[in-house]
Amino acid sequence: MPMMLGRRTVLRGFAGVGLGTAALATGAVGIAAAIGAARPELPDLPELPLDRSLPGIARGTLTAAPVAGGPAANQLGYAGTYPGPLIRLREGERLELDYRNRTELTTNLHFHGLFVEPGGSGDNPWITVEPGESFRYGLNVGPGNAGLHWYHPHVHGRSGSSALAQMRGLVGPILVEHPGKDRLPAADDRILVLHDIAIEDGSVARGQLNDWAVGREGDLLLVNGVRYPKVSAQHAWLRLRLVNASNARYWHLSASDDGLLLQVAQDGTLLARPREIRDLLMPPGSRAELMVPLSGRAPFDLVNRPYSRVGSVYSGETPVLHIRPDRSFDEQRRLPDRLADWPEFDVSQVARRREIPIALLTICGRYFDSQRVDFPVQAGSCEVWTLRNVDLMDHPIHLHTWRFEPLRLNGTAMPYRARLDTFNLRPGDTLDIGISFERYTGNSLFHCHIVEHADKGMMAIVNVS
């Protein structure tokens, strides 16, 4: 049966001020002067130029450097923009990326969500690029990578390096195009990088003691570097591809008219079936794709609503994107009942089960040690991990390289099927995940994606051999 759609036409809008990043940089005076100004258009992120003159190879250069005109005086970005440019790839090609560090920080790149080689010049977080130096990354983007991912720093052993760099703006999206056409109807297709920034005296300052304990949230909520932009739609569907690039903020999104949203992908992978939802919770590091029906709908806002967790900055309900259909749509093509046909995790093939407690900035009671293997895994095997959050706060767990299928949460089978790399654990949660350690070998990482927690050692090494 096709997915049926509900209709809501009651607008419950939220009054707000649209500010570009230039206005934000001027501080309180600039903000006051902008009251009543027109909302900015949602910026399209520029694409990183890639040379494809050699068959099967995409070559480019990505420079991390200070960016002028952003919300903070010490703003950083990639290729001269904040957020960084979209890296658009194709399944089956090789990315050769010259990464240049023109910041004062030791940094590197993590290709978050890509199913690629974890060692060598691939998605290897043990690589470090010192100020003024460069490194050439090489990634074979094979089958199974189609979808939305992102890139950001992932430096170990230098407390605060990744957290400060990410808060200052070193984030950017990756889109791997599907080799064929997916089953979704035509839509206005937009990528949204969600990011918040904490500014003190015009600059992003280093985190305070409490920030390392609970994660740092900023009071500026930005979409593609802009506060509360607007988007106009030419189709009856609006496809929103969202990346939570925040250090610690959970984005809890819903429509101001309480209208229907259809989730079709999570963490770069299409769901088996669409999900009818009224709100979407995105923990740090996660991605999601929404199909927003516009037929019969008046203009409305996508709003961020408070999410209760230890250490959260309670900012109230905040509009983050204004959505305006350009015209009325008489007909709306329905979504297919089935989106993807990837195989279900086979628990009968499990070679090993592990119990993994998570608490107090530790995994299995230990802080990160770059010389210690925490989870030795046999290549090609399947495992079930039982993750137990025995802490008093949420922890969004993230696995590099391999994806997992959530199987049971607190003893109950998951209500929908998905392949993920990030999942939020509430205090007291117990989650069973199934992982197939296929295709690659080497060292990878498993950690909390509140970036301050990872910086302080809430990480473990997975060695597949």
Image (spheres, rainbow, N blue to C red):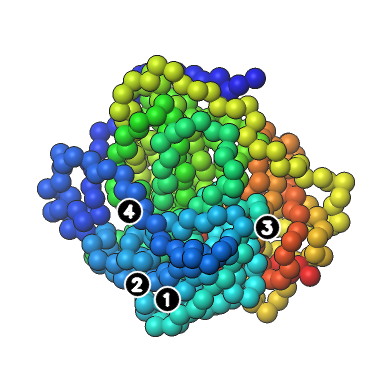
Work out whether residue 283 or residue 240 is closer to the camera in this orientation and state it: 240
Contact? badges 3 and 2 (CB < 8 Å) = no
- Three-letter code for the amino acid on which mark 2 is drawn: Ala
> Residue 367: x percent and y percent?
63, 70
Q: CA distance from mark 2 to mark 4?
A: 16 Å
| Residue appearing at x 21%, y 56% in the figure | 22
Query: Mark 2 — residue?
Result: 65
> Residue 359: x percent and y percent?
63, 59
| Figure check: 111 above or below 2 | below
> Residue 131: x percent and y percent?
41, 82
Query: Mark 1 — residue?
Result: 100
Work out whether residue 37 or residue 111 is closer to the camera in this orientation and state it: 111
Quarter of the image where one finds residue 76: bottom left
Q: Secondary structure at mark 2?
A: strand
Mark 1 packing: few (<14 Cα in 10 Å), some, or many (20+)? Answer: many
Report if residue 172 is visible in the image.
yes
Q: CA distance from mark 3 to mark 4?
A: 30 Å
Mark 2 packing: few (<14 Cα in 10 Å), some, or many (20+)? Answer: many
- Three-letter code for the amino acid on which mark 3 is drawn: Trp
Q: Quadrant of the C terminus?
A: bottom right
